[in-house]
Amino acid sequence: MKIIVTHDNSDFDAIACVVAAKKLYPDAVPVMPSSLEKNVRDFLRDSGYDIEFMHPSRVEPEDVELIICVDSKRIDRSRVLEKVLKKGKPVIHIYDHHPAHPKNISGDVEIIEDTGACITIMVDIMRKKGIEMTAEEATIFALGLYEDTGFFTFTSTTPKDLEVGAFLLSRGANLNIVSDYLKRDLTPEQVELLNEMIKNLEVFRIAGIDVGITQISRDKYVGDLAVLAHKLRDMQSISALFVLARMDDKITLIARSRTEALNVGEIATEFGGGGHPTAASASIKDLTLTQVREKLLTLVRKELETTRTAESIMTSPPIIAFPELSLEEAEKIMVRYNINSLPVVDKGKVVGIITRQTVERALHHGLHEEKVEDYMNTEFEVATVHTSIKELEDIMLSRQQRMVPILDESGILVGVVTRGELLKALYEDMVKSSVSERKVPFKKGVKSILRERVPDWLFEIIKTAKRVGEKLGFNVYLVGGFVRDLLLRVENFDLDFVVEGDGITFAVKLAEALGGRVNVHEKFETAIVILPDDYRIDVATARLEYYEEPAALPKVMKGSIKRDLYRRDFTINAMAVKITGDDAYTLIDYYGGLKDLKDKVLRVIHNLSFVEDPTRAFRAVRFEQRYGFRIGPQTEKLIRIAVRNRLFEKLSGARIFSELRHILEEKAVWGMVKRLDKLGLLQFVHPELKIDERCERLFFSIQETLSWYELLFRKEKPEIWMINLMALFRNLDRSKLEAVLKRFGISKKERETVLQGISCADRVMGELKASQDPVAVYKTLTPYPLEAVLYFMAYAEEEEVKKKISHYLMELMDVKTEVRGRDLIKLGLTPGPIFGVLLNKLLEAKLRGEVKNKEEELEYLKRLLKEQHVA
């Protein structure tokens, strides 16, 4: 007898392999596993596909001459396999993709490959042997492939898995069925279980990796735990998850990992189980849940501390000092960058370390001009990028060294690890937190969100940027508002790239690849790529900014992505999406921006944020009101301190206006103006600004007017900020209004528009109220630019006046005569002042509706000439 066996509690991959094995060994009999996962049972019931399983009780070990093991080679994972091998000595053929394990059996024939799914191996053999399959069989194989590779998203997925997937589609695999059975809604029981898993979830940050552990207890066995483990890990966006479930008389461990630093297969092996680096399980007896949890934490810490290296936690590029630098200059560098020690570099080699404590003591003794080389510590240890963080801990403890310089393979200084960074990586998990309090994961894949939210033309640009960056060997990131709005599901097509390397070189190559041109700003190491359709892409070199005094413009130097993000205003704007390398399309979040997005809170990154750049307070108000967020308590406190210290008075008018203009262009402008007033910020726009009920009505009326005008679909678009500025400044007298507009640096034409709107509004209201003639309405409004006319419409409190202005905007302002000067010459007239008189009378007639086309215009002129006897 020849039999086909797989592991108990079989999933789609196992069952697919059984079906494939039957194709390869037609005379072999599949043996029913002791249990099937629920979605597998549902599929076999609904589809009616008959595998013709033999019941395990009918297997006589002595009769088995060949046993074909698929998707498993563990003797403890199949009762049938254990039963047969205890009494019989059959020939064994093994087809598997799981890693080595002490309880693995040996086979006479072994086909073991490192693929995402075992069915990949089986189908590849069928394909090479030319064995045909039906569309139904291809669908079963696809179910196994898609399930075990997570729809090709698990890191265990290989190129061969993708090739086999394409082959199955060519053989009629039905993806609708795959989707139906792999993406089913949770049952009420599963929802209850998932909710319990969420409530019991503990998240530990170990060596910089977020690891989740959750525990549940049930009196009887519950299936499909693996499905819930996947869902929970994805919901919480954690790097690794361990589910501990006490059921019957044992504990089931389900482990999932999305980081190469943690091999959960090795962890599960320590409990007598096994699996892949990214997915594993174990069945544990004779231990309590508490004992398993403690052992698990010990194993995870040990694994991560040996796999994580200095390169993963170092600060790069490092801030350095030179031997000939004075101690006073060294102190300035430390204060400027908020660091406590500096590596001292001479001719490319690290020759010492100088600490802030040493410098401050020396300065206390008046040694300001002494050189760094005279007081630096020359007895120190260095490490390489490959040094484990556990070894770094040994260096710091044994040498009492606060900072370790990190060298690359050639001995060049590429970064530093400080004591604080090491402690955070090693021991951040010592205080566990509930899921509602835990820190947001450092990394999260966002490729699916990008594909969902970004149009194809824009994603092609991103992919081109990826190729250019990888060819140059640069790390390239999407940053700023694009990332924020991507996560908020808000439309934003403004790409902003930051490059770890040479941003200008990247921009030049990107422009070449896209057929565009580039504008370069050497001083700030930034560039703008301009495409043929005038679409613009911002590119910057990753940089670090520092401020020599409060409210000053920043000084710029090259930095890392971490430092580049640190210089930004709020945590929600300090996230990046890496688009290059093996971890492309990964969200990078050092400062908790993702959590703040979910909590709808605005936080600054550090407490000196408004001291360095007070304009950020205006931005805080804008983002708060635009997105319906709230300014965090500490951030609001810092704004009020900046107001109290009157830091905003140090800002130029142009910088204040730049932020104010953005606010005045928003739809939620009134909420922003009120918030500015409440925080005491409006006084720095102008001390005499006051908001009242009339002001509120006017701002809302402007929004209604603009919405109405938008529905006209006119080509001429107004400058919205000007109209709102008129409402904000309407109570200032002319001299103060002119002064503040000049201070803001507004152009002469824009100043005249704002002045006209404010100063002429009441007079225009009076003229329009008194006039019933469309000619008079036209003459009243036509001298004013569009922004002023829209302001008048919003300003008008009487409906009759609003109707006259709307009539002007909808019809009168477009009225033009078709007759021109040459037509008057044809009528026998001599060019002169009479032309203007006649054409004006003709325009008035057309405004009143007395003439409608050129023919009627000519007839009207002829009558007019006859009446006036003009020759």
Image (cartoon, rainbow, N blue to C red):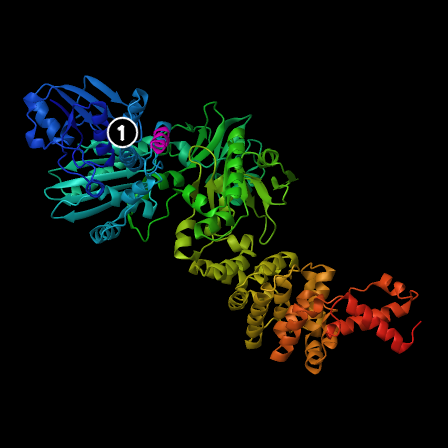
Point 29% across, 36% down: residue? 139
Percent of width and height locating residue 520: 65, 39
Q: Is residue 645 left or right of residue 23?
A: right
As for residue 164 lying within the magenta part, the answer is yes
Q: Which amino acid type corresponds to the residue marked 1 in the rendered image?
A: Cys
- Judged from this view, the residue extending furthest toward the bottom is 770
Name above or below for residue 293 compared with residue 194: above
Does any portion of residue 442 appear in the rendered image? yes
Comparing 184 with 786, the one in front is 184
Mark 1 neighbour density, 10 Å: few (under 14) some (14–19) many (20 or more): many
Percent of width and height locating residue 613: 56, 53
Highlighted range, magenta: 163-171
Does any portion of residue 840 appear in the rendered image? no
Q: Is residue 770 left or right of residue 427?
A: right
Percent of width and height locating residue 602: 45, 56
Comparing 273 with 158, the one in front is 158
Exactly how many numbered labels are in the figure?
Answer: 1
Name above or below for residue 679 compared with residue 229: below
Could you say which quadrant of the image residue 630 lies in?
A: bottom left
In terms of secondary structure, where does tag 1 sit? helix
Percent of width and height locating residue 493: 53, 48
Q: Which residue is mark 1?
A: 118
Point 93% across, 65% down: residue? 830
Comparing 603 with 457, the one in front is 457
Quarter occupied by the C terminus: bottom right
Quarter occupied by the N terminus: top left
Could you say which quadrant of the image residue 733 lies in?
A: bottom right
Decide whether the magenta segment is chiefly helix, strand or loop: helix
Q: Is residue 585 left or right of residue 177?
A: right
- Judged from this view, the residue extending furthest toward the top is 108
